[in-house]
Image (spheres, rainbow, N blue to C red):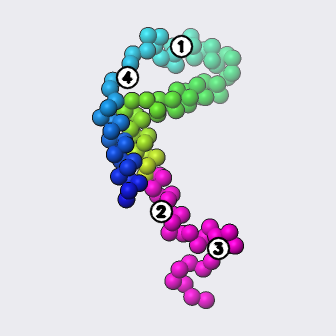
Amino acid sequence: MALVALGGGAALWLWLRSGAEPVDPLGNLLLQKKHMHELRVMGGSANVTMAEFQAWFAGLWRGRTLAGTVAVLTVLGTLSFRFVARNAYLFRPDGPLDPPGSSR
């Protein structure tokens, strides 16, 4: 519960503190046909796909989107922690044991 409270609090703080995105004076190059053509000529459609992925991934770490990213990572981290904590018997160095409550 503490992980959710800490991560949720951080996400809320980021959401409240983030302002409007600053305007890029050059504009978004991925919206310009000439730039997209040059990317396609130099590296094919894989180059275009990677440029779009890179722009999307970089956008996850700015502004209000960062708050959403922190919230999602908090939920995933908490679920992972709970899974490992509940199934600790699977991760023993000498091999997995029978689950608690089972009898052989």
Q: What type is the residue that disc 2 sits on?
A: Arg
- Looking at the rendered structure, the kind of residue marked 1 is Lys
Q: Name the residue under label 3.
A: 96
Q: Is residue 44 left or right of residue 74?
A: right
* Residue 1, picture quadrant: bottom left
- Measuring from the top left, give residue 13's x and y in whole percent: 33, 39
Query: Counting residues from the N terminus, which is met first, the one under dot 3 or under dot 1?
Result: 1
- The numbered dot on residue 82 is 2
Q: What is the number of the mark on residue 21?
A: 4
The nearer-to-camera label among 1 and 4 is 4
Q: In which quarter of the image is the C terminus?
A: bottom right
Is there CB contact under 8 Å for labels 2 and 1? no
Q: Residue at x 50, y 59 (%)?
A: 81
Horizontal side of residue 97 vs 57, given as left or right: right
Could you give the CA–CA distance between mark 3 and mark 1, rounded to whole angstroms?
57 Å
Check disc 4 and report its element: helix, strand or loop: loop
- Boundaries of the magenta span: 76-104
Residue 28, above or below 7 = above
The circle on residue 33 is: 1
